[in-house]
Image (spheres, rainbow, N blue to C red):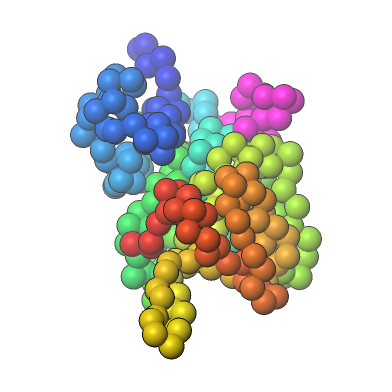
Amino acid sequence: MDGPAMKPTEQVERALALSDAGWNNCQIARELEVNRRTVSDWVRGRSRLRRPSHTYVSQQARNRGTCPRCSNRASENGVTLGVAPYSYAYLLGLYLGDGTISTHPRGVHRLRIFLDRRYPVLIDECVAAISLVMPTNKVGMRRHKEAHMNEIYSYSMHWPHLFPQHGAGPKHKRQIALEPWQQLIADRYPGRLLRGLIHSDGCRALNRIRHPKKTYVYPRYLFTNRSLDIQRAFCDGCDRLGIEWRQDGPWNVSVARRESVAVLDRHVGPKR
Ligand SMILES: [Zn+2]
């Protein structure tokens, strides 16, 4: 059977990238020659993305995995990227912010991302990103005992390859350095990285400044993480997009200038 020229995962990735670049669903549908409603589902991170495994991925790909270390995918500047770098950039942000990898018997690992269940759209987006990065494996979800939190998880032998920052103890107590292939993805899609970081460890809040005659209210973003390395990843992403940031206490980075908030609004926006 002849497959399509482009694998569906790559197609979804391209659709998301075009949407991010300001294309509307009609334009994307024409460009990729797919149904407009399908594009609309992809862009909104709907349930169709949740189980691409059985329909989308060949047995060969399933066996080899989709990870940059184990697959024989073509490399770029000597660096091998995974199947879905656009979604990976977002997932990397989520992982660095509030993700963890636990070890299970026979070399299996579980990626766990903890998200506030008051934001269902955000949870859908996380599930979709994991499905695209690891299309062979299903994504599960359960309520975490901590208030308001859902744990989104996926089992694979390859998670430590995809997130080599995996290690014992909390992230702020060890060095978190991105590998060259991760840095390449972070540099190419800084908006996606920032989106993941803010979705897990940040917020967009209204700041009030009171003056005797008037109270000023303006939106600002706050990113909070105890790891200086992860704070630096956030600030590097901001620098790439020309976003002005400032340190606000030992754990916070704040983005408050109007033009910079506008840039972040294009890539992140309020949590939903
Ligand atoms: Zn691997």
Between residue 106 and residue 23, name the one nearer to us: 23
Q: Find the residue positioned furthest to the right.
A: 175
Quadrant containing the N terminus is top left
State which quadrant residue 149 falls in: bottom left
Please name the residue shown 34% across and 21% down the image: 32
* Residue 71 forms part of the magenta stretch: yes
Judge whether 139 appears above or below 72 on screen.
below
The percent coordinates of residue 240 (x first, y second) are 62, 44
Count of numbered tags: 0
Please name the residue shown 48% across and 50% down the image: 263
Say whether residue 212 is visible.
yes
Relative side of 49 to 180, left or right = left
Please name the residue shown 48% across and 59% down the image: 258
The percent coordinates of residue 243 (x first, y second) are 58, 52
The part of the chain drawn in magenta is 63-81
Relative side of 30 to 200, left or right = left
Quadrant containing the C terminus is bottom left
* Residue 269 forms part of the magenta stretch: no
The percent coordinates of residue 253 (x first, y second) are 62, 67
State which quadrant residue 158 falls in: top right
Q: Find the residue positioned furthest to the top.
A: 2
Q: Find the residue positioned furthest to the front.
A: 213
